[in-house]
Amino acid sequence: MSCCAFYVSALLLLLTTLCHTVFALSATPHMQVVNDKSFATVTSDEIVAYAATQGTILSISTMGPLFRGVARASHDESIILGYCNGAFRPTGNILHGDSIQVFKPSLQKAAATNSNFRFGGGTVFGVGLLLGCLCLRHGLDNGCKVVEFLAIDDEDHQHARLVRHYKRLGLNVVRYVGEDIRDIPDRLVWGGCGTLMNGDIASILNKWTPTFTATPSNENVEKTI
């Protein structure tokens, strides 16, 4: 991402936060934030170390409130497996998850060129979980308590699958962002319609801590779901 794109994203995020205040939209209903639990959650180093045992290198870069997590194959760092973008909201201690993407062709290439590479990243949710939790831990370390994300509604079947996927990860449904006037601030941020979801960062990380801190096994993965 270029410097110009970073600053444009930051400005858009600030303007949208102001719009949310003016329109008095409820951002986090039906959710209790669990405070002072960061000491019990998995650390960034533990997430990175776990990913390394699965043949994946994780890194995160920042520019102001913006961040970008990247996953690469450890045996060939030119193979980019996926990325996760986001930012810290100027107010509210909120981590804004902009996008997360995992490249299936890259996973297949990594698996074909290294027999020790774990295609699923050692979990049923794959490399996306590794990236997502690293970014959540980054947010927690910088004072964020809540994560928000939009399950984009590009098509009915895919949208429903995304909502189920994020609910299993630990996020909650807030409301649907549609074409109404009151949804304009949200559409400016997310770039489309979809289901707005959020979750308590500490709770989500606590849920997945056993996966990252215990010896990887299929039984251990299933117990965290």
Image: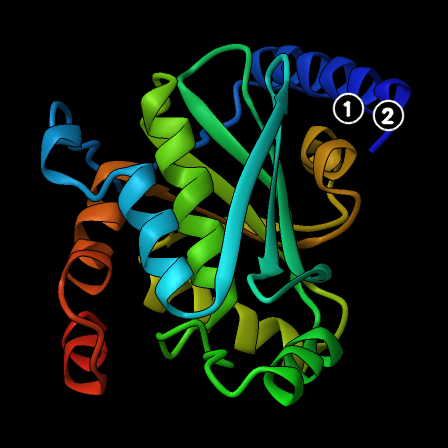
Q: Is residue 143 visible?
A: yes
- The answer to whether the residues at label 1 and label 2 have Cβ atoms under 8 Å apart is yes
Q: Nearer the viewer, residue 127 or 145?
A: 127
217 above or below 8? below
**Residue visible at 70% across and 50% down?**
178
Residue 39 located left or right of residue 136:
left
Residue holding disc 2: 5
209 above or below 164? above
**Residue visible at 35% across and 66% down?**
53
Q: Quadrant of the N terminus?
A: top right
Under mark 2, the amino acid is: Ala
Query: Percent position (x, y) of residue 4?
Result: 90, 18
Q: Is residue 174 visible?
A: no
Residue 153 located left or right of residue 210:
right
**Residue visible at 25% across and 40% down?**
31
Q: Residues within 10 Å of mark 1 (few under 14, many from 20)?
A: some
**Residue visible at 72% across and 17% down?**
10
Q: Quadrant of the C terminus?
A: bottom left
Residue holding disc 1: 9
Query: Percent position (x, y) of residue 166?
Result: 44, 63
Quarter of the image holding residue 164? bottom left
Q: Nearer the viewer, residue 47 or 99?
A: 47
Q: Secondary structure at mark 1?
A: helix
Q: Nearer the viewer, residue 14 or 196?
A: 14
Under mark 1, the amino acid is: Ser
